[in-house]
Structures are given as structure tokens and as C-alpha cells.
Image: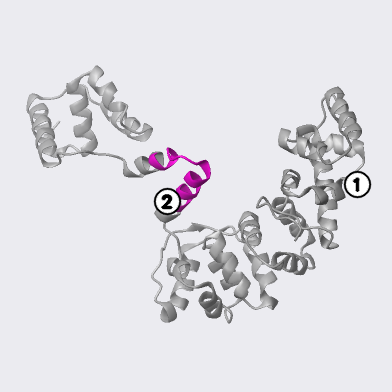
Amino acid sequence: MSFDNLTGIDKAAVLLMCLGEEASAKIFEELSDEEIGQVTRTIATIDHIPEDVKNNVFAQFAESQRQFAGLFIKGNEFAKKAISSLAGEQRSEDLMDRFVSGMETRPLETISRMQPSMVAGLLEEEHPQTVSLVLSTQHTAHASEILAHLPEEIRADVVYRIAKIEKVSPEVITKIEDALHREIGIVGSKEQSQVGGLDKVVDILNNMQNQIDAEILEDIEETDPDMVEEIRKRMFTFENLTTLDGRSLQMILREVNNDSLTMALKTASDEMQEKVFANMSARAADMIRDDLEAMGPVRLSEVEAMQQSIVKIAMKLEEEGKLVLGTGSGDELV
């Protein structure tokens, strides 16, 4: 073993062996599993440490301590823990989202700092596939605003294409950036990006205003009704019924028989159950409570199917203009 031929891992292994098992165990507490794995694999290959190697390793360690004196800390983890400790769960979540998003290397970053109307003007002459790729790389609220400013005749096509996207290769991102670079001077990431998909579409549509989301879904339905059904399932769930005002919920409950409602409430939250019971007669509520207590095990798929049938009733009433469905934001009739 020669000191000049030792790698950084080799030197760390030698240092730990010289410090002993107890000290090494304490140091391991500060290392990641991967780091521990690397150094212990190296330790396992060492059966003799020459005196000169030991002295040189200790001397270099002492010099490193002097040169890099101060506090070493994992800044990313420290920031996350500090944010998580903030009072107010919603504020903490919002700040964490911003922090994580800010730490991510996102393609087409310059687009995210432009006014939505300007981006829409820049993209409206591009192919819908290019537009969908660009919007897929943007944060939800920004993408929704850009979509609202695009020509109405291409919105549905763009959303449909976003739903079909999974990953974008570095080459594709590079081509898009190069095409836009002449106009807005974008210099972006060359890393592969996970973008698009149904969840991205749901987030974008949930941020749309003035019923534009409904118009887009109607247009897509002509091409792919199965996709639209899946999007609607994700946009509005059975538990979202708790966001409705009493009159709207009562309107939905009038369309549902007690047996179906009992099945749907089998896995519902206490909040959901109480909201339903508060919007029906006391006699009917007591009957359903008794039926729920007496109900034996049922298949989860059956419960979910019944919940979805009630959601479809709610959506039908919305299409007829009789109520307005919220998606967790507390929307009510106006």
C-alpha cells in the first residue's frame, strides 16, 4: 500500500480504521447509506496499514481540518427542515413547493418568467405538439394562464397532447429551445425531464377560469372519450362533494337512492358522512347510519364504482347548468 496511490475513499477507510470502531460508528451516523457502503467495502479489502501511510493520512486530515475550518452542513436538508417547522401547515406546504421547484433544473425556464399573454403570442403559430411540450415544462398556474390566452381552436388539441406526454428527451428540449432562442434568448437545461401526463392536465384544467376547462374537455371527448372520463375522475372526486353548498348537495342526493348512498359512504371520511347527513332528513340519516353499522365487508371496487356513479350524477347536473362543482377550492353557486 502506497500513500501516493490512495484514492479519497481509500484514505477515508484508512482513517476510520485507525480511529477505531467506536469513533467510526459515530462518523457513520453523519454519512448516507451509499457513502457507508463505499467506505466499508474498501475497509473490507485492507488487511495491513503501513506506518508511513497511517502518518500521511493523519497529516493530510489535520491539514484539511485547518484549511476547511468552519461549519459543514447539508444546506438542502436544513432548508427543508426549517420550512417544515413553520407554523401553519398550508403556508409550510406552499413554501416547500416553491423551494423544491426553485431547486429543480427546469427546461425552458425563461418562459416561466414571461407574461402568459406574451408566451401565448409566441407559441400560437407553433405546432400544437410543440406548444404542449412547452406548457408541460411550466408550473401549473402559469401553464393554465398561457393556455387561456391561446386561440380557442387549438386549446383542446394542446391539452390532449399534454395528456399523452410522459418523458421528453434532451434532444427534443434542445430543438425547442433552439427554435425559440432567436426570439427570447432562452438557454435552458439539457437534462431529461418528466413532464406531461394526465395529472399535469388535471392540474392545468383545475386552474382554468370561466368554464374554459369544460369547453376543452368537450372538444377532447370527441376524439378520446375514455381519456376525458379519466380526467374528470381525477378533477372531481366523491370527497369533493363536501365543498358544495347545501342546496347543491341536496339536489344531488335527490337523484340517489338510499342503498346506493349507503354503499358509497362505506369508506367516506367522517366529514363527508356528516355533510351528507346534515343535508337529508333526520329519519333518512338515521336509517343510513344503522345500515352502515350493520353492513359487512364489501369490495372496495364496488364502493368506488358507487361513488363514481354519484359523481357522474353531479357532473350531469353541472352540464345542465343546475349547479357548479368545486374541485377542492370551495366553489359554490353564484
- Circle 1 sits in a helix, a strand or a loop, which is it? loop
Q: CA distance from mark 2 to mark 1?
A: 46 Å
Q: Give the amino acid type for the residue marked by disc 1 in the picture.
A: Arg
Name the quadrant containing residue 17: top left
Return the x and y of residue 84 as percentages of the image width and height: 44, 40
Residue in view at x 15 percent, y 30 percent: 1
The first of marks 2 and 1 along the sequence is 2
Quadrant location of the C terminus in the rendered image: bottom right
The color scheme shown is one colour
Return the x and y of residue 162 as percentages of the image width and height: 62, 63
Return the x and y of residue 262 as percentages of the image width and height: 86, 34
Count the numbered circles shown: 2
Q: Which mark is residue 254?
A: 1
Whether 221 is among the magenta residues is: no
Front residue of 278 and 77: 278
Q: Which mark is residue 99?
A: 2
